[in-house]
Image (cartoon, rainbow, N blue to C red):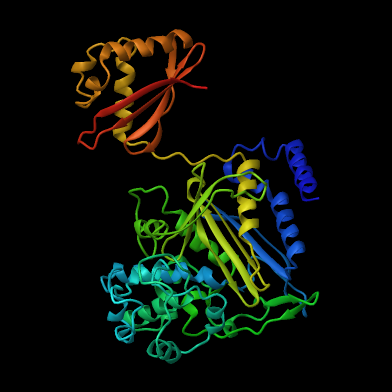
Amino acid sequence: MKRCIFTSLFIILLLTGKIQAQPDRIARIKATMPVIEQLYRNQAAKHHLPGLAFGVVVDGQLVMAGGQGFTEIATKTKASEKSLFRIASMSKSVTAMGILALRKESKLKLDDPAYLYIPELKDMPATTTDSPPITIRHLLTHAAGFPEDNPWGDRQLNDKDEDLIALIKSGISFSNAPGISYEYSNLGFALLGRIISVVSGKPYQQYIDEKIFKPLGMSSTIWEYTKSPKNLLAHGYRYEDDVWKEEELLHDGAYGAMGGLITSIEDFSKYVAFHLSAWPASSGPEKGPVSRSDVREMQMPWSFSGLVADYKYPSGRPYALTSGYGYGLRWSRDCEGRTGVGHTGGLPGFGSQWQILPQYGIGIIAHANRTYAGLSSVNTAVLDTIIKLAGLKPLPLPVSAILKQRKEQITKLLPDWKNAEQSGIFAENFFPDHSLPHRKKALDVLLAKVGAIKETSEMRAENQLRGTFLLKGEKGDIEVYFTLTPENPALIQYLDFSLKE
């Protein structure tokens, strides 16, 4: 049934020209809205979601958003992009960003032992005599050796600071020595919240509000549900005995750093846009609460978390997938090189997920008000569908000046390679690796197949010192690939020609 609905909507979009007739990237993405809404309707029906809100962020702005169902069943309050949902563990990357903001202020280091800021940790018995002290970095990457603590941690949300300290004093049970392996820990992020409070001298929540939310213009994001306008607050439910039963909302507390945030699609989209703004690296002015390099550091896979050789996209397309954990962020990369960064969230009454594809400049957010509502698969399907229907390609990287210069110098030498050895643009290894006569002969074979070269294409960069361009001939194209050395100025160390298929 789903396949029929998807196919019908796809045909409608093609026939109306909405996909192909609009060259503008955002317009093409917006044209997929009917398909996207149907994917979420299917998800809500299949998993009995009372209410759901979603949004798509592209090139720094929320370009599509909507809601389905109800945030409160009794009053039939409709869900929308303005509705305030508790987003659970999606809060973790905000905590991580707070730690990096303190590092930016030179108030801590990531490899500091955590006991410098929570003294009670110093006297806590270690798993083994050779266990290293738990560091802030261990906590950020779920490598502190604490056991996976879902769903126990979810019920600690409104604990007090003294409860957290009492837990430490009583002794924490470890599953591993610190630094050995990834194991998801809500407790670890509660400790990070405590560190932020101690170092900043103010409540964790206040520091995050001032240092992250205010600079990003996130004026609707809160920690305590009693501060929400009644008509915007999403109530949480579990589906049991074929009916929805309301879950008790927990107050904010010492574990808020692991999962206490309450926000809307509209507000959280600003945070997602900031994460996207870190790509590609640039020399533009810094406008965020931390630097763009800090954001990229957060998004790197610091702890390996898994490999799924038989992973399949929701459409059924098979791809191997590897995953890791950054600072409060999940990271994945499939065998085609598509990279995803984001986080899930789940608490009694709620389930959520956000994800960005930095190479495409696109992100997705979805919130629902059913216990542990799994939204990762539908969000992955939405992104995959948008890419397919809107014809999106990875965004081109800026081409460095040295790549442009070397491209022009290469094209001037061809096809006869006149004075190539005296040109000064090739590294010392270049001609010893393959002699000039050998290189000329190989290129002549390709030129005979494509005919006279009419023009060259724009450079396509893989990074600042590597890329490709095309020699466009009468009967075909030759792809030119080259890499440069670490010298300054960078010289050509490798050059390859091949027929463009």
Q: State how many labels appear.
A: 0
Viewer-nearest residue: 297 or 74 = 297
Place of residue 84 in the rendered image (x, y in percent of width and height, measured from the top left) = 61, 73
| Res 65 seen here | yes
Q: On the rendered structure, is 70 left or right of 285?
A: right
Q: On the rendered structure, is 100 left or right of 306?
A: left
Q: Residue at x 24, y 23 (%)?
A: 430
Q: On the rendered structure, is 387 left or right of 76?
A: left
Residue 354 sits in quarter = bottom right
Place of residue 158 in the rendered image (x, y in percent of width and height, measured from the top left) = 53, 86
Viewer-nearest residue: 370 or 199 = 370
Above-or-below relation of 327 to 336: below
Above-or-below relation of 410 to 203: above
Above-or-below relation of 294 to 475: below
Place of residue 387 in the rendered image (x, y in percent of width and height, measured from the top left) = 60, 44
Residue 100 sits in quarter = bottom left
Q: Residue at x 41, y 47 (%)?
A: 280
Residue 234 sits in quarter = bottom right
| Res 64 seen here | no
Q: Residue at x 33, y 49 (%)?
A: 283
Above-or-below relation of 126 to 279: below
Place of residue 302 in the rendered image (x, y in percent of width and height, measured from the top left) = 39, 59
Q: Residue at x 75, y 38 (%)?
A: 16
